[in-house]
Amino acid sequence: MKYLKYILIGVLFGIIMTKSEAISWYRIQEMFRFQSFHMYGIIGSALACGIVITQWLKRKNLTSLDGTPIEFADKKMSIPRYLFGGFVFGLGWALTGACPGPLYTLLGNGISVYLVVILSALLGTYVYGVVRDKLPH
Amino acid sequence: MIIEFLSQTWAWYVSGPLIALIMLLLLWAGGQFGVSSTLRSMCAIGGAGKQASFFDYNWRAQIWNLVFIAGAVIGGFIAHQFLQNPDGIQISNHTVNDLEALGILFDGQLAPKTIFSWSNVLSLQGVIIMILGGFFIGFGTRWAGGCTSGHAISGLSNLQLPSLIAVVGFFLGGLLMTHFLFPLIFS
């Protein structure tokens, strides 16, 4: 079962995101209003650990379970792509109170109307794919 | 006892490192931590490759990520069913007051029920928040090539300048929406 491990990691992720309340619209409002350290603490400590993990993996040249090397590709440099694209996502993050991971986990929490948000996100991704040649990258 | 302990709000210094652990586990399993690409995969599976070459790629190699997010739904279900905090969530009084001034009453749920309900989907407010908001998420993450997981965690962990620019963009968008557009939307 090569997919079993992914479903288990996903379950753990869903529980963490729910119990940390990072999937909460209110928590995202607190964050964008600078009225609580909670979200900054989560992102900051995840990042601090992530940097250590990534540098360690890079130095050790470790392989994943299936034997392929764990590789980290550098992202191609651009300013408009990341700034404008990021800006548009930020508008949606504040409106919906969720980024893509939480969208799925909110469904599991029984807030079924987030299905509308997911379908709209699919439409947004689709429209991006159609018009991408006309956008600065 | 353990269930009660786990049912509290998990502190940031527990949650953050655990999210980094998720990134490590995904890398170890042969994947990577980046959730928004699942939206592209679903478009490709739906046949969008016929209309736009952006979706004409080997999405089968990305099935693991769809399995991962299926797990994220189940994880949300488990936490909701078995680890629910009896006190609901608690947020800063300042935020409660700010939201009240916009006409949004804090209800201790994950998201305000008055906004995120099926009966509100087709109101002007619902269209802006849920439909336009979702559209921005899908359009923006793909344009930027990643979301909070792919850029703010994976990319910044690998010290990528593009990810830093993306995260600055996330916050510029979020701050503009919260501080300047919310008063218009909720007036």
Image: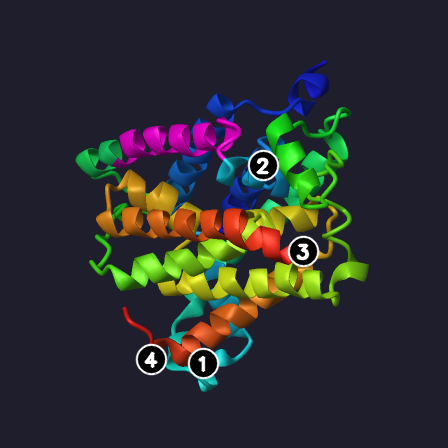
Which chain does the residue under circle 4 lie in?
A
Q: Earlier in the sequence, mark 4 or mark 2?
A: 2
Locate residue A47, reporting x and y percent: 36, 34
Left or right: A2 in relation to A24:
left
Q: What subunit carries mark 3?
A: A
Relative placement, left or right, of A58 versus B124 is left
Reading the chain from its start, which is encountered first: label 3 or label 2?
A: 2
Mark 2 surroundings within 10 Å by alpha-carbon count, few (fewer than 14), some (14 through 19), many (20 or more): many
Residue underneath mark 3? A114
The residue identified by callout 1 is: B49
Q: Nearer the viewer, mark 1 or mark 4?
A: 4
Q: What stretch of residues is rendered in magenta?
A: A34-54
- Do marks 3 and 1 share a subunit? no
Residue that protrudes farthest toward the bottom in the picture:
B50
Q: Position of residue B65 (x, y in %)?
A: 48, 55
- Residue wearing tag 4: A134
Can you name the residue that lies furthest to the right here? B119
Q: Quadrant of residue B27?
A: top left
Which-is-in-front pick, marks 1 and 2? 2
The quarter of the displayed image where residue B97 is located: top right
Compute the Cα span from label 1 to label 2.
37 Å
Residue A130 position within the rendered picture, expressed as x and y whole percent measured from the top left: 43, 80
**Dot 2 lies on which element?**
helix
Find out whether the residues at labels 4 and 2 contact each other: C-beta distance under 8 Å. no
Tell me which chain the residue with mark 1 is part of: B
